Image (spheres, rainbow, N blue to C red):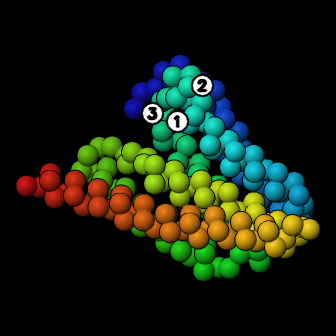
Amino acid sequence: MELSRREVITLPNLLTFIRALGIPVFLWLLLAENLRGWSFIVMAIGAWSDYFDGKLARWLNQESELGAILDPAIDRLYIAATVIALALKHYIPWWLVVVLAARDLWMLAMLQIYRDKTGRVFSVTFLGKAATFNLLYAFPFLLLASHSAWGRLAHTFGWSFAVWGIGLYLLTALNYSSQAFTQSKELHV
């Protein structure tokens, strides 16, 4: 894939890049410095920017192959870093990390099958966007749940988003798996 400078240097890709820079900042703030408030702000900005980079790309007509690959990759990294950090700090249970990691490992295998057969990556679906949205919004609330005057409310919102996000995340994996296997069968017939 050869990209022109115009496809790489776009406002939506810059927003995605800033979100990527937020990952190590979040980890340092939470794990090294134990600054929950600042960690929350970085996570909230990351969730907000994930919503707006795609909207901005469509609005400015700056959708690109690079953005289509980077955005979901940064989402996966953000989710992985966040759940591991939150589990290390005992804000979420380890089973949640295992479920999300197992799903992502499965999806790597499905992506490889799909890419081998089609030469492409999966197209992001509305269901996938909804799953990511729910997970990225769950984590800031779960961080606040045990360290805020709004703890009970944050806990309720956090786990509501998390349950929906996990369910949609797993459903999306089934949907993409179906695409990979269906594509595989169609190409062998």
Quadrant containing the N terminus in the rendered view:
top left
Q: What mark, if any, has residue 67 been given in the picture?
A: 1
Question: Residue 91: which quarter of the image?
Answer: bottom right
The residue that appears at 66% across and 35% down in the rendered structure is: 15
| Residue placed most toward the observer, 8 or 37 | 37
Asked whether the viewer can see residue 22, the reply is no
The residue that appears at 60% across and 25% down in the rendered structure is: 10
From the top left corner, tell me how far across and down residue 131 is, in percent: 53, 58
From the top left corner, tell me how far across and down residue 89 is, in percent: 79, 74
Q: What mark, if any, has residue 10 been given in the picture?
A: 2
Q: Amino acid at mark 2?
A: Thr
Q: Amino acid at mark 3?
A: Glu
> CB under 8 Å between callouts 1 and 2?
yes
Q: Amino acid at mark 1?
A: Gly
The residue that appears at 56% across and 25% down in the rendered structure is: 59
Residue beneath disc 3: 65
